[in-house]
Image (cartoon, rainbow, N blue to C red):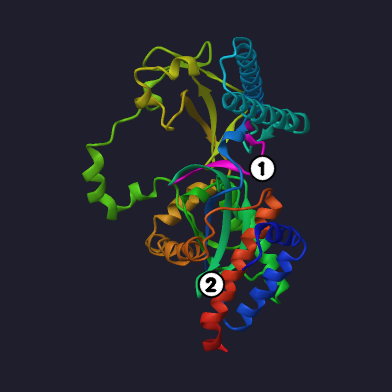
């Protein structure tokens, strides 16, 4: 029989200082056996559940409310127990069941209270509070094709020649808008550690899906001299190859409200929606998105949540208020606009589809063949170690399958 979890977990946790050098040693063997092409790479993220439940997530306010509800439920159970004892109605089995339930809820409330006393609000990239998790504070809620999960976003930068992973990193962020800089920086360190110079990636082609389309990511690619192809969300709508498909679904698509449907009240600096409700500017801070600068106005969730025209107005599924972005200018250099023009070229449309053939089989191998369908440890450091171990095993498999033929 193999080692159980109590043996494996401490072993993995102890590899904090050793995991990156070990990963680089395997990468060095791949390089010596000519398994790295160095000319084309694909980057993507695999969202996997963590060893924590969604029910333990929330803002500081949410968690305080949950604590109070649990404490109230405990009081109700104890009161019911006292009443049953007076009337001698409850059986011993019912008494024990009620006591166990009360004890479990009491421990959950104490756990939340302890966490709140030791932690502060978690602030996201936009400067607003985002949900924390009591069990694993580094994990986050993420939308996937299988629904919402509590987990991590495991990044992998993959070389095209034999699908060798040159850098892996687990992140608690569900969005990929800021992932390229840290991944590229670590990948450069990896290549330098195995004997290449700091210009190894210059001129190389890099593809990533539209989740990576942001000024931060694209600017990093430009600075590093990468020939990157990162489409925006609407690139298929501009592609003439999809004209027939667009016509097929055109009649089924419901037109959403646009900025032109909202009336601006200059005196009070507000917008009035088609249903007569006002949207106010939430902050004077200018928001940046895709190289463009916006002011944000938002409606009242008390009204928007029950509005008869909600489906025509609120784009995000499950959203309870309308956010309206009003364009006020552009940055001096619009990296997003440059990338949109690049992805719409014949070369861009030809190269971008390579991404799926490079990186998707890697995730399929790790998730299906290696059976990593969730992370079993907690905390970014431990989860990152676990992810790099699987990346190493994937690369070792490449050495076994292809290495002997290239020696």
Does the magenta-highlighted stretch encompass residue 135?
yes
Q: Earlier in the sequence, mark 2 or mark 1?
A: 2
Image: 112 above or below 88? below
Looking at the picture, how far across and down is residue 118, in whole percent? 78, 33
Quarter of the image where the N terminus is located: bottom right
Q: Secondary structure at mark 1?
A: loop
Distance in Å between CA atoms under marks 2 and 1: 38 Å
Looking at the picture, how far across and down is residue 365, in whole percent? 49, 66
Quarter of the image where the C terminus is located: bottom right
Instruction: In this rendered view, identify the residue nearer to me: 96 or 377.
Output: 96
Question: In the displayed structure, does residue 380 sit left or right of residue 302?
Answer: right
Question: In the displayed structure, does residue 86 sit left or right of residue 232?
Answer: right
Instruction: Tell me the magenta residue range.
Output: 129-145
Which label number is shown at residue 136? 1
Q: Residue at x 40, y 64 (%)?
A: 347
Q: Secondary structure at mark 2?
A: loop
Quadrant position of residue 69: top right
Res 50 visible: yes
Looking at the picture, how far across and down is residue 126, in whole percent? 62, 35
Res 35 visible: no
Q: Residue at x 52, y 55 (%)?
A: 373
Image: 111 above or below 34? above
Mark 1 crowdedness (10 Å alpha carbons): few <14, some 14-19, many ≥20 = many
From the viewer's perspective, is the residue at label 2 or at label 1 nearer? 1
Instruction: In this rendered view, identify the residue nearer to me: 316 or 108.
Output: 108
Instruction: In this rendered view, identify the residue nearer to me: 272 or 344.
Output: 272
Does the magenta-highlighted stretch encompass residue 35?
no
Which label number is shown at residue 12? none
Image: 87 above or below 159? above
Mark 2 crowdedness (10 Å alpha carbons): few <14, some 14-19, many ≥20 = some
Residue bearing mark 2 = 39
Contact flag, marks 2 and 1 (Cβ < 8 Å): no
């Amino acid at each position: 029989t193999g080692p159980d979890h109590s043996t494996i977990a401490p072993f993995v946790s102890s590899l904090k200082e050793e995991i990156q050098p070990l990963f680089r040693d395997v990468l060095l063997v791949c390089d010596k056996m000519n398994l790295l092409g160095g000319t084309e790479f694909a980057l993507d993220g695999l969202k996997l559940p963590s060893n924590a439940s969604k029910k333990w997530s929330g803002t500081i306010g949410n968690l305080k409310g949950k604590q109070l509800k649990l404490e109230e439920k405990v009081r109700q159970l104890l009161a019911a127990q006292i009443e049953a004892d007076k009337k001698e109605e409850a059986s011993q089995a019912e008494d024990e069941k009620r006591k166990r339930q009360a004890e479990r809820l009491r421990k959950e409330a104490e756990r939340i209270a302890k966490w709140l006393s030791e932690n502060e609000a978690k602030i996201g990239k936009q400067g607003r509070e985002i949900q924390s998790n009591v069990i694993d504070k580094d994990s986050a809620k993420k939308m996937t094709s299988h629904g919402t999960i509590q987990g991590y976003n495991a990044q992998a930068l993959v070389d095209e020649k034999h699908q060798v992973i040159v850098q892996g990193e687990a992140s608690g962020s569900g969005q990929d808008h800021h992932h390229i800089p840290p991944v590229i920086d670590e990948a450069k360190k990896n290549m330098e550690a195995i004997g290449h110079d700091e210009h190894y990636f210059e001129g190389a082609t890099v593809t990533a899906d539209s989740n990576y389309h942001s000024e931060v990511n694209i600017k990093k690619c430009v600075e590093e001299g990468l020939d990157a192809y990162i489409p925006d969300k609407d690139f298929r709508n501009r592609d003439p190859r999809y004209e027939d498909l667009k016509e097929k679904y055109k009649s089924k698509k419901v037109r959403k409200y646009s900025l032109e449907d909202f009336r601006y009240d200059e005196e009070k600096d507000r917008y009035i929606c088609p249903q007569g409700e006002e949207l106010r500017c939430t902050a004077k801070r200018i928001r940046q998105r895709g190289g463009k600068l916006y002011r944000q106005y938002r409606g009242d969730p008390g009204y928007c949540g029950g509005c008869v025209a909600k489906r025509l107005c609120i784009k995000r599924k499950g959203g309870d208020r309308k956010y309206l972005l009003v364009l006020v200018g552009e940055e001096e250099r619009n990296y997003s606009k440059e990338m949109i023009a690049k992805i719409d070229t014949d070369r861009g449309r030809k190269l971008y589809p390579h991404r799926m053939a490079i990186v998707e089989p890697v995730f399929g191998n790790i998730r299906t063949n290696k059976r990593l369908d969730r992370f079993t440890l907690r905390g970014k450091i431990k989860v990152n170690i676990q992810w790099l171990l699987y990346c190493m095993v994937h690369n070792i498999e490449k050495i076994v399958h292809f290495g002997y033929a290239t020696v």
